[in-house]
Amino acid sequence: MLSLLLLIPFGGALLLALWPGNPTKGRMRTVTLVVLGLQLAWSLVVLARFDPGNSAMQLQESLRWVDSLGLQYKLGVDGLSLPLVLINGSLTLVSAICTRDIDKRPRVYFALLMVISGAVNGAFLAQNLLLFFLFYELELIPLWCLIAVWGGANRDYAATKFLIFTAVSGFLILGAFLGLALLTGTADFSLTPITSERLSMGAQLLLLGALLVGFGIKVPLFPFHNWLPDAHTQASTPVSVLLAGVLLKLGTYGLLRFCLGMFPEAWAQLAPGLAIWAAISVLFGSLAAIAQKDMKRMVAYSSVGHMGYILLAAAAATPVAILGAVFQMVSHGLISALLFLLVGIVYRKTGTRDLTVLHGLLNPERGLPFTGSLMILGVMASAGMPGMAGFISEFMVFRGSISAYPLATLLSMVGSGLTAVYFLLLVNRAFFGRLAVTPITDPVVHGRLDVNLAAVAPRETIPAMALAVGVVAIGLLPAGLGRLSEASTTAMTQLPALAAALKSGGLG
């Protein structure tokens, strides 16, 4: 059953690659939408077969592959991975729906979208370390191509930076996995039999450190964040949706599944420092966002801050905090995708994302009133307004972490308050006031010119509306996601080694 979540997108990519003749861009887009729609539908079938009360891996599949290397095709799903599989299926479909202006190599573009989606599913479902690494690396080159070929004016620089940072991430993760096998004397890379407790604390800390940096680059956390703003700025809107909504979650998933899950004793030793690291990342992301003039870079830096909440929750390692981390991954995926979609609409209609030249876009007659209304909803959700997904996620993280790390939690709460500051700056500058766009390309013109912006077609806003509904639904009805993940996240906090560390004060 789980293999179909890989076979559907990979098969769709192969279908496009082998499609005879020279099919039109519209036909290739239609095929992609059908394939990704089937993938999402099958994800819902998996959801229907999933037992939320069972914390163990479910619907497992196993096939011997390369026994001499310890590589097995082994898949499984639990309450940590299933929500991310659903988010991947939803946002990849949204990315394809929003892709309408691809004139250069559309066959390759849509095939790469499906390869990325299948690779991400494989990473979330893999129950073998080497298999996870293969899928983790498989999405690297396709995403690099999507930025380098279909990106903005400085796409080569941004794509190269992304490639270098992510390659270092993969190198560290693979090194830690191989080091674990070497030090434990086993060639079995399956997650179940790995017992890192047999290692000395020094060895555990060394391997955990490599994984923390590797996944920290992917999240990204400060100071490994440098590649993200450039990648977002140069990427097209659909690629930014995919990058922020889905691909960053590979890093946070790795922190929970492999760092906390495989090295609970060493994690307990490092947890106080990790909580401070999380707070620093939150504050830096928020302060950096305040300083931005480009709307897209502002949203990109906000991701750095919001991903820090997940590290804080993982450091606290309480049932409420870890469940909050899952909520945060899901809510950030929806909210960031919504914001990038709306920024993309503003850019298409005005030709700029510069907050110093955009004004009055909420104008009900000649502006973008509906887009502006959705933007206000999105920034309210990101700032943690009650009744929306951002609030319940942050509340659970803070509630589960404050008893363990009050200082780091309070600093992160300050970062949450700063989110309201920079997004209010965005809304106030770009959407309120008199409708005007200053032509920054003409240095002779110093005044603001009144404009009549082209109307936004319903097909452009329907994906954003769907995401907005999801943001509000999770905020008002969080119990469904909570039931889906609670058993698995609670079990993660009850690992014997972690429980012993908590009891001895290792996390206090």
Image: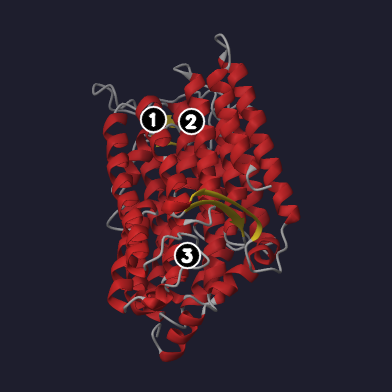
Q: Residues within 10 Å of mark 2 (few under 14, many from 20)?
A: many
Going by the picture, which residue comes out furthest to the right?
A: 48
Q: Residues within 10 Å of mark 3 (few under 14, many from 20)?
A: many
Going by the picture, which residue comes out furthest to the bottom?
A: 504
Label 1 close to label 2 by CB (< 8 Å): yes
- 208 is higher (above) or lower (below) than 464: below
Three-letter code for the amino acid on which mark 3 is drawn: Leu
* Separation of residues labelled 1 and 2 (CA atoms): 8 Å
Left or right of 494? Residue 351 is left
* Residue 482 appears in the rendering: yes
Earlier sequence position, callout 1 versus callout 3: 1
Residue position marked by numbered label 1 in the rendering: 145
Earlier sequence position, callout 3 versus callout 2: 2
Earlier sequence position, callout 1 versus callout 2: 2
Residue position marked by numbered label 3 in the rendering: 256
Residue position marked by numbered label 2 in the rendering: 112
Three-letter code for the amino acid on which mark 2 is drawn: Leu
- 281 is higher (above) or lower (below) than 136: below
* Separation of residues labelled 3 and 2 (CA atoms): 28 Å
Quadrant of res 158: top left
